[in-house]
Image (tube, rainbow, N blue to C red):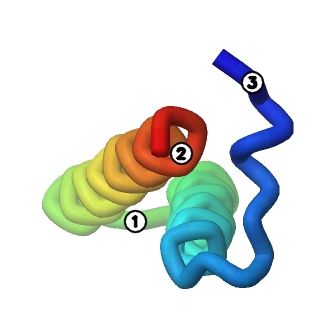
C-alpha cells in the first residue's frame, strides 16, 4: 500500500475526502467549544463520525485504486 497514491488532486474523490475531513474537524471543534443540549450534541457527534468514516472510505479507495 503506497500512501503517495492518496494525493491525487485531479481526482474528485480526493477533494471530496478533503472536504469531509475538514467538515469532521469543524464539527468536532463545535462540539467541544459551543455549549449544546444533549440532542444537539448527539446530532453533531453522529455527523462528525459519519464524515470521518466516509473520508476514511474515500482514502481507502484512493490508495487502492
Q: Are marks 3 and 2 in contact (CB under 8 Å)?
A: no
Give the residue displayed 48% in from the left and 34% down from the top: 64
Q: How many numbered marks appear? A: 3
Give the position of the N terminus as an image quadrant. top right
Depicted 36 relative to depicted 59: above or below:
below
- Residue at the outermost front position: 65
When asked about the image quadrant of residue 21, the answer is bottom right
Nearer-N-terminus badge (3/2): 3
Q: Tag on residue 36?
A: 1
When asked about the image quadrant of residue 26, the answer is bottom right
Nearer-N-terminus badge (3/1): 3
* Residue 32 picture location, percent across and down: 62, 50
* Residue 58 picture location, percent across and down: 43, 53
- Is label 3 in a helix, a strand or a loop? loop
- Residue at the outermost top position: 1
* Separation of residues labelled 3 and 1 (CA atoms): 41 Å
Q: Are marks 2 and 1 in contact (CB under 8 Å)?
A: no
Give the residue displayed 72% in from the left and 83% down from the top: 10
Which residue is labeled 2 in the image?
A: 59
* Residue 17 picture location, percent across and down: 55, 64
* Separation of residues labelled 2 and 1 (CA atoms): 31 Å
- Is label 1 in a helix, a strand or a loop? loop
Give the residue displayed 66% in from the left and 68% down from the top: 18
Relative horizontal placement of residue 15, taking residue 50 as reference (left or right): right
Nearer-N-terminus badge (2/1): 1
Which residue is labeled 3 in the image?
A: 2
Can residue 65 be seen here? The reply is: yes
Amino acid at each position: 500500500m503506497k500512501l503517495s497514491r492518496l494525493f491525487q488532486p485531479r481526482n474528485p474523490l480526493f477533494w471530496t475526502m478533503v472536504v469531509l475531513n475538514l467538515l469532521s474537524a469543524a464539527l468536532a471543534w463545535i462540539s467541544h467549544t459551543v455549549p449544546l443540549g444533549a440532542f444537539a450534541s448527539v446530532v453533531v457527534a453522529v455527523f462528525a463520525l459519519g464524515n470521518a468514516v466516509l473520508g476514511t472510505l474515500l482514502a481507502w479507495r484512493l490508495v487502492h485504486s
